[in-house]
Image: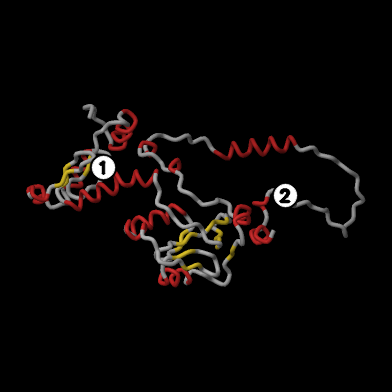
Amino acid sequence: MCGKTFESVTATIRHRFKVHPNSPTKFFCHYCGMQFPLKTHRDNHQTSHDSSESKRTELHKKCEDCDVLFYNGKALDYHCRSIHKRMVHLFQPIATPPPSNKIKVNSMNDALSVYYCHLCGAEYVIKFNLQRHLERAHTQEEREAVPEDLIKCTVCAALFCSKRAYEVHNTYHQPNDLYVTSEQQRLQTVTKVDQDFDIRRVEGVAEKYVPKDNTPKRLAKSWHKLKRTQNVEVRQTDYSSSDDEPGATNDSSDSDSELPLKQRICS
């Protein structure tokens, strides 16, 4: 690309994405379609394939979008799905049915909406994962087909296009499941509404090799805690001491998110 050499692969990759981030040069395996950050990586990988495919010119296919040659149709198909169609789906995500009335609590005590695939009944708590499932497990024809009838679950109000999907969905229901009764209650209960995929959360390729700020977060938290303590007005009042009357404590909070989950649902 520029002729420079480096002592390690990490240094080479860091230079590649910091100095040449917009370079059109891409390194794809001609046998399977995989993409690699460095030419040496690609060349080493290609030794694992049968080299005789490179001589079967009648099977060779070229990508119409980026003019890259592949030795078989399977490699071209993988390349198009992983490179070109993936970018389209990031900005034009696959449509999904609305979330059900069921909610789940994760390990961080966050209440999350529950989604179901309307075509097969599979359960997801991340909307992006449902979109990825629809893309990989169901064809475009299945996704775009107009159903003859819709089946609505009497427990969580989820919608399904077939009886089979509805039956699979029912296997996810448990006696101790939690539900909301309205969209307003969902907004009050669910911590992350929709759990939509945000492209800003995706770590760029270059960011993996760029040194990060290692400033300890504990110091920042201690500073904010000290600042809050200084702003608290302390008032001393004389009370009659008694061993029978424990000191009163005020655990109230104006934040709904600090209330117990079941209390939030019932409110």
Looking at this view, name the residue that lies furthest to the front.
148
- Up the image or down, 129 lies above or below 102; here it is above
Percent of width and height locating residue 184: 62, 54
The residue beneath circle 1 is 36
Q: Residues within 10 Å of mark 2 (few under 14, many from 20)?
A: few
Comparing 106 with 221, the one in front is 106
Percent of width and height locating residue 257: 64, 51
User: Marks 2 and 1: in contact by CB < 8 Å?
Assistant: no
Report the side of 160 relative to 25 (left or right): right
Percent of width and height locating residue 3: 21, 27
Callout 1, which amino acid?
A: Phe
Q: Residues within 10 Å of mark 1 (few under 14, many from 20)?
A: some
Which badge, 1 or 2, comes first in the chain's sequence? 1
SS of the residue at dot 1? strand
Q: Residue at x 52, y 61 (%)?
A: 100
Q: Residue at x 45, y 48 (%)?
A: 197
- Up the image or down, 253 lies above or below 118; here it is above
Q: Quadrant of the C terminus?
A: bottom right
Comparing 170 with 234, the one in front is 170
Percent of width and height locating residue 35: 26, 44
SS of the residue at dot 2? loop
Report the side of 92 relative to 24 (left or right): right
Q: Disc 1 versus disc 2: distance between alpha carbons?
A: 52 Å
Report the side of 205 relative to 233 (left or right): left
Mark sitting on residue 71: none
The residue beneath circle 2 is 253
Callout 2, which amino acid?
A: Ser
Looking at this view, name the residue that lies furthest to the right.
240
Comparing 91 with 246, the one in front is 91
Q: Quadrant of the N terminus?
A: top left
